[in-house]
Image (cartoon, rainbow, N blue to C red):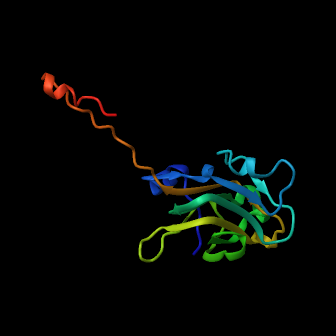
Amino acid sequence: MTSTGMTQKELDQHTAGLQEIGDQAVWSLSSCKPGFGIKQLRDNSTDTYWQSDGTQPHLVNIQFRRKTTIHCIAIYADFKADESYTPNKVSIRAGNNFHDLQEIETREIGEPCGWISIDLTKSNGRSLRTFMLQVAALSNHQNGRDTHMRQIKVFGKRKEQCTVTKLPTFSSQDLSAYSTIR
């Protein structure tokens, strides 16, 4: 499947009801050029990017402290700006740790300029629950060696808002004894 990319507004509509949970994870990279690492990959600016510096595949590791429900992952890529640095084929892997990762999705992303959203729900509609995600850039356009990824966001279910029930005001002396909860 080839993707051209979504705008930020389209991504917001696509992920309505979800929240970005990437800040709950520990991020690591297979390699990076100095000044082009995790900070740039996660700074919410599509003008900055992670640039790998090594042999393919180029890896982004996302490790959660507890088993986490993940609905989708979004990658921002810009072929016009990055040309041969733009990933052409990416693999999403999941597992408990580095040693048991299983490929759950492979995507050819064409010549994108925008957000590429990769749905991680299973065919039965259940979301992925995992400790670790890995995004692997398997190949680049024009046989490029290093990769640019401008942003990666991970989306999970929005936490339920806890509502506090207002207790009734007791007017009689007998019932006022129950107005305080210990």
| Residue found at x 61% / y 51% | 24
Q: Can residue 114 be seen in the rendering of this structure?
A: no
| Residue found at x 75% / y 66% | 59
Q: Is residue 71 above or below residue 158?
A: below
Q: Quadrant of residue 60?
A: bottom right
Quarter of the image with the C terminus is top left
Q: Quadrant of residue 74?
A: bottom right
| Residue found at x 42% / y 72% | 125
Quarter of the image with the N terminus is bottom right
Q: Is residue 108 above or below residue 153?
A: below
Instruction: From the viewer's side, name the closer residue of 141 and 62.
Output: 62
Instruction: From the viewer's side, name the closer residue of 160 and 85.
Output: 160
- In this picture, residue 65 sits left or right of residue 148: left
In the rendering, at what x and y percent does residue 164 appear? 33, 37
In the rendering, at what x and y percent does residue 121 appear? 48, 70
Instruction: From the viewer's side, name the closer residue of 134 and 54.
Output: 134
